[in-house]
Amino acid sequence: MIRPQWVCLHCLSRARTATASRLALARPALAQNIIRRQSHTSARVDGDEDFFLAGSLLKRAKQLATEHDVLEGQLMEDFDTKTAARAGHLRPVSEALKEYEAAVENLKELRVLASDPESDLSAMAADDIPPTIDQIRTSSAALTASLVPRHQFAAFPCTIEIRPGTGGSEATLFANDLYKMYTSLLSNLRWQSSVISYQTHNEIGGEGCSEAIISVSTPESYDLLRHEAGVHRVQRIPATENKGRTHTSTASVMVLPKLGDEEGDFEHGTDDDPLAQIDMKDVKTDVMRASGAGGQHVNRTESAVRMTHIPTGIVVAIQDSRSQHKNRSSALTILKAKVAEKRRKEKEEEALSMRRGVVKVGAGRSDKIRTYNFTQNRVTDHRSGQSNHDLPRLMGGDGLIEMIEGVREWDKQRSVEVMLALQEMEDSKKNNKK
Amino acid sequence: MPRISRRITNHLLKKNQLLPLLYRDNRISELAESDLRILKSHILQHASLKNSPTRQFKYLKSLCERRARAEPLEHIIGTAQFYDVEILSGRGALIPRTETESMVMRLCDDLKNYHFVNKKRRRNLGNSFRVLDLCTGSGPIALLMAKQLYELDLPYGFRILGVDVSESALKLATRSLEYNIKKGILPKEARRDVGFRQGDVLNPEPSIYGDGEDRGLNHLGKSEVHDEIKSFFVNECQVDYGPMVDIVIANPPYISANGYWEDTERSVRLYEPEIALVPPEKRPDNIADDVLREDIFYPAIEEFATYFKSKAIIFETGGDKQSSRVKAMLESRGWETGTWKDYRGIHRNVVGWRKETGWNWLLLPSKDGMSYD
Ligand SMILES: C[S@@+](CC[C@H](N)C(=O)[O-])C[C@H]1O[C@@H](n2cnc3c(N)ncnc32)[C@H](O)[C@@H]1O
């Protein structure tokens, strides 16, 4: 089962306005050259009136509201912090649902009244219908927002790691371009960051970078920058190319939450997530260290840790803290989350393909997230479908935030669809049993 | 010290000109790189050096040169990160090790997940939860346990006392306590809840009260250290209910004389006090002759645990063989026992508990997956 984390509306809207004001601050003129491809994931609509909430979404909301009421009842009997936290997370759903239902009820009555020509009130009722529909729109948007899960590490700062991929020296040049792009972005956003590692060397055509690690200490930075993780692809004519051919190379960007030295609050931990359960026998822990007896015999700082989940091949390397145990427990937390994410993705894709009636959603899709086409002066994000037609400016950090916001929006819509799809899959399984 | 080959030097120089300095003591290029990363971020925190890259670099280089002479990183930076507390480090005490950090975290996680899960046990018969950390050094065990126990918010609180014979170590311990309070890592109440006292665990000084037991002074009298411990834990309004201490925990010196010369790192011998690592040659009278020199602290500490009716005892040891000897010693004295492995699979800890306490949760693997046995 998917275990989303519920974020209260308040936080969500706060986060949104925070981004908006950051935008206004950092970007006086919004890039006009964004072409938005029509989103290919939209919530399905039951009935012919588009302002009602999709049936399955409504069902999900009702389930959660019921759970909320049950929990509240339990809390009256016996207070328990965990129950209280869960109830707290569900409250916005329950409240948004009440508002929505009230508005829908209202509309029904108004329509009855309006359709009765005998009644003195019919004209008045007809006048009241449009504002009520608006109300339904607002409350159903709010309800949808309250259902969208927030990422479990959303509150954390992060590290960005950039490494060249395929393409030889072109790839190292591109890695350096990405490094510069992110440092400009960070300074535009006025986020606090420090460069942990930046390995460069001279290449024909400029400076190449074989590794760059940037640590961003601004809280919640992970929630935005996590959308940057993946393979970035470049298409351009290298300086060394004498036949004028365009080459394709890649660089990979990794973004990890920094669970760091101060204990942050998880939206919810991986402890109770069934998808995050892993057998420690499948986990290999590597610590950079000299051999020997350990304990009191050695006083070197061997804090960096690498953990591998053997069955999935997922690797997490952590060196945030000088405490090895801290790094090990962060590595394990992130490893569990990554394993869970992989399993969840598989499940989601199954549900989505059932819903869309295609063989497999995302089958064969690589994790290439964006292409930077220098020849055509264009940057395209493969997830949101957005393009930007001023590549130099984008790589100077201008216009990138809009692109990430686009991905974030895409991600949110997709989450809604996934939620519906999972619900439908569960329902159809139940029906099959009957 | 063997010379570093040209090839390695070139490889390191290509990455950063300071790396060869850091390679000298580390002998692994990834470790040298990790030192560099840590020293860099240390320097970036110096406000006075901000905006002056040349001075930053000069200072960084001077620190790397110190590290090249095998000075430990913690001494150079001034603190060790011990999970979520910071411990001041200096020549007067041992730098806390990651194995010790894991021991404390496992104990605290198990206390949280298995012991304090019900209200009755959280109440602890209306007493504060009491921990005695013998051979505390600069206090890492005591301070990290304090940090973790505050998070449990026990109804009657807790008390932790660290005892060490070394004055310089105790100074670091006391300053570390203040340092963590100043940084907001520990609350002010830690001044009341955590204490450090001087005392010799092997040869307790006779008490000025004499052995007072037959004179109705059974609250005092075994030795000065025992008196100190009692007066720290007992509050006046409490009647003697039995156990005076809930847990005795210790990471005592455990290296043999030979092991000191053969198995320890140069940096350890150069920069850490020998008294923290190797038990003294002269054994106390009450320790049997067949006990190996490197083991003598364990029975001595066990006597404290028995005297104060401790429910459990937790030891760090030098490895598999020492663990099995210590385990046998505890069993011969009536303890239920077990061992914990460290992240490398070495039997690093021996745990003992009294049968009637039912504390066999000490043998359960930790809930977060951070135990390795
Ligand atoms: C291995 S260190 C442990 C320090 C600290 N607890 C830790 O885990 O990092 C051992 C400590 O025992 C102390 N010590 C040595 N002989 C002692 C004795 N006879 N009585 C009490 N403490 C002693 C040393 O001063 C040293 O601080």
Image (cartoon, grey):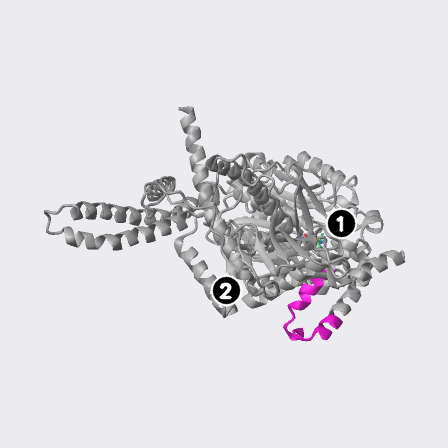
- The magenta span reads B36-59
Amino acid type shown at disc 2: Gln
- State the residue lying farthest toward the top: A434
Magenta portion: prevailing SS class: helix
Give the residue type that dot 1 points to: Arg
Q: Is residue A299 left or right of residue B180?
A: right
Chain of the residue displaying label 1: A
Q: To which residue does mark 2 refer?
A: A32
For the question of whether residue A299 can be seen, the reply is yes
Residue B193 visible = no
- Is residue B48 on the magenta stretch? yes
Q: Residue at x 54, y 53 (%)?
A: B159
- Callout 1: SS: loop
Among the 4 quarters of the image, the one containing residue A377: bottom right
* Residue B212 forms part of the magenta stretch: no
Q: Nearer the viewer, residue B107 or A351?
A: A351
Front residue (pair B7, B318): B7
> Horizontally, is A375 left or right of B111 in the view?
right
Residue sitting nearer the eye, A271 or A426: A426
- Other-residue count near label 2 (Cα within 10 Å), few / some / many at <14 / 14–19 / ≥20: few
Q: Which residue is mark 1?
A: A289
